[in-house]
Image (cartoon, helix red, strand yellow):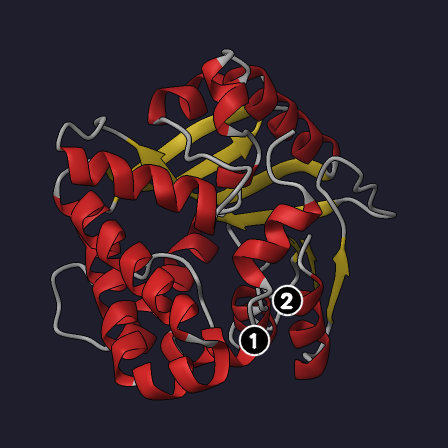
Amino acid sequence: MGSSKADIAVSYDVSNEFFGLWLDERMNYTCGVFDGKEISLEQAQLEKLRILSGFAHVSEQSTVLDIGCGWGANLEYQSTVNRVKAAHGITLSEAQCAEIHRRRLPNVTASVCSYLDYRPALKFDAVMSICMMEHIVSPAEAREGKSIPAYRNYFHLVHQWTRPGTYFGLQTILRNFVPRERQDVRDVGWVTYEIFPGGITPRLEEIISAVNPYWEVMEVKTRRLDYRQTTWHWRERLRRHESKIRQTWGDKVFDDYDRYLSTCIRGFEKHYQSLAQYSLKRID
């Protein structure tokens, strides 16, 4: 269900160097938290990781699972800032996993594995997942009404991987209003199928319904404008490196990513999409 390994390669295996040009220095590919402050993208991403670590109740004694760990930004934070006992990340991207191994982070391991196949040897006492749930359900499956059962199965699996008392720091993009303007409809559809094939963003009500009976929702915070600001920063950095990107990866890569990020900025401005952070507590 959702994004296959081949789909994930389309989304994330363009080139680690390419993404490093326009993401922050740790390569967070998710919404930072600005809270209306004049801070850098790097500071906003650290603030995001601080907040989600709090939502997951991470401590130095924690064993942390990061589901959909990307290039290791959160794993690096857990290792070097929170100094956790151990952290493990799973991803379907070979390129992302290679980057994590390259960083040689203390007490960190990572593997290329679907959450559907993951079977940890030991149970965790803190879980985090930052914008991975967008890959659980495909657009076709969403149209067929399969979203909530798929999300509930995900929450069930995470429940099985954890110890009693575990907290879960979760972040997801949200699908809100349906675009009505013709160009917006074209652009949003193009991003869905060309940049992130196989996945679709959930709706807030689907998440709230699907956590039952495995997790209790303790707190939810939406951050639509923070994601608008994050994607604006990404586009500015992308455009700063236009010449190098066109020379190294070709005109299509630059044009596609400029269109994608421009669509994101409009999407968050017009409420087509939002973002939510959740603190969930395991129901024992």
Dot 2 falls on a residue whose secondary structure is: helix
Q: Position of residue 28 (x, y in %)?
A: 45, 67
Between 199 and 251, the residue placed more toward the observer is 251
For this orientation, the residue located farthest to the top is 145
- Up the image or down, 201 lies above or below 216; here it is below
Numbered badge on residue 16: 1
Corner quadrant of residue 35: bottom left
Question: From the viewer's perspective, is 29 left or right of 127?
Answer: left
Between 33 and 56, the residue placed more toward the observer is 33
For marks 2 and 1, give the CA distance. 8 Å
Q: From where the camera sits, is residue 211 visible?
A: no
Amino acid type, label 2: Gln
For this orientation, the residue located farthest to the right is 121
**Which dot, 2 or 1, sits closer to the camera?**
1
Q: Position of residue 55 (x, y in %)?
A: 44, 48
Quarter placement of the C terminus: top right
Corner quadrant of residue 36: bottom left
How would you rate the neighbour count of disc 2 (Cα within 10 Å): few for under 14, some for 14-19, many for 20 or more?
Answer: many
Dot 1 falls on a residue whose secondary structure is: helix
Between 125 and 203, the residue placed more toward the observer is 203
How would you rate the neighbour count of disc 1 (Cα within 10 Å): few for under 14, some for 14-19, many for 20 or more?
Answer: some
Q: Which residue is mark 2?
A: 96
Q: Residue at x 41, y 67 (%)?
A: 252
Q: Residue at x 21, y 27 (%)?
A: 177
Quarter placement of the N terminus: top right
- Up the image or down, 231 lies above or below 202; here it is below
Q: Are marks 2 and 1 in contact (CB under 8 Å)?
A: yes
